[in-house]
Amino acid sequence: MPFMKGKAPIRRTLQYLEAGKLVLRDHIKIFTVNYNTHGNHHQGARDFVFWFLPQIQFKNPNVQVATFKNLTPSPFIKCYYDSGQEMLIDIDSKPKESVLSHLIQVIGKSEQILSAEARQMEKKDNPANFGYGCDRHCICEIPGQVPCPATVPVPQQWRGKFKNAVE
């Protein structure tokens, strides 16, 4: 498998990407991480980018995610909102887990919002749905569809028994 090569190939698996905990709020449009590739107080930011940034990108496809290396004396995260506001989050000398938990509290969606969105995605009141647990038990209940053969007999020219019969 060619995708399982390199440093920590587990980061490229679908199971790992779906396990991300940070889903950004809808009004965040750009998420940037500024850090240096050297220095002990940047180690948490480097680890955060290495381990959690792919998950953030996967969970937030409508958010532009950018990293800036070796441009700043102290590491920070900057979020740009659709209203034009900016939020600056200091991550100097923090481990990657505490950075993630802080981001979940500050700019992440709450568990209630995520569960409500999941329920909304699997709504059963779509008129195209039919079967057990839906408004319609059978597709024959939808106007314009062929009625059930149990209630209205199918015309003989539609049945293979008569259509393919040898005369």
Image (tube, rainbow, N blue to C red):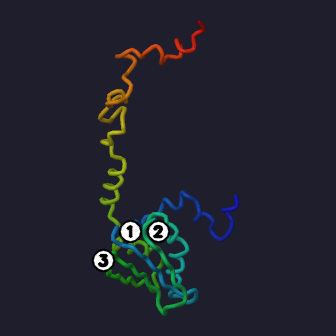
Q: In this rendering, is residue 37 above or below 114?
A: below
Q: Pointer 2: what residue?
A: 56
Q: Pointer 3: what residue?
A: 83
Give the amino acid type for the residue marked by disc 1 in the picture. Answer: Leu
Q: Pointer 1: what residue?
A: 24
At horizontal 30% and vertical 59% (from top left) the residue drawn is 112
Residues packed near mark 2 inside 10 Å, few (<14), some (14 to 19) or many (20 plus): many
Q: CA distance from mark 1 to mark 2?
A: 8 Å
Q: Work out whether mark 1 precedes mark 2 in sequence or the reverse, and give the earlier one.
A: 1
Q: Work out whether mark 3 precedes mark 1 in sequence or the reverse, and give the earlier one.
A: 1
Numbered label attached to residue 59: none
Q: In this rendering, is residue 141 above or below 12?
A: above
Q: In this rendering, is residue 17 above or below 87?
A: above
Question: Which residue is farthest front?
Answer: 167
At horizontal 48% and vertical 68% (from top left) the residue drawn is 57
Give the amino acid type for the residue marked by disc 3 in the picture. Answer: Ser
Q: Dots 3 and 2: beta carbons under 8 Å?
A: no
Residues packed near mark 3 inside 10 Å, few (<14), some (14 to 19) or many (20 plus): few
At horizontal 50% and vertical 72% (from top left) the residue drawn is 53
Q: Dots 1 and 2: beta carbons under 8 Å?
A: yes
Helix, strand or loop at label 1? It is loop
Of 130 and 47, nearer the camera is 130
Q: CA distance from mark 3 to mark 1?
A: 15 Å
| Residue 32 picture location, percent across and down | 45, 79
| Residue 151 picture location, percent across and down | 34, 16
Give the amino acid type for the residue marked by disc 2 in the picture. Answer: Ile
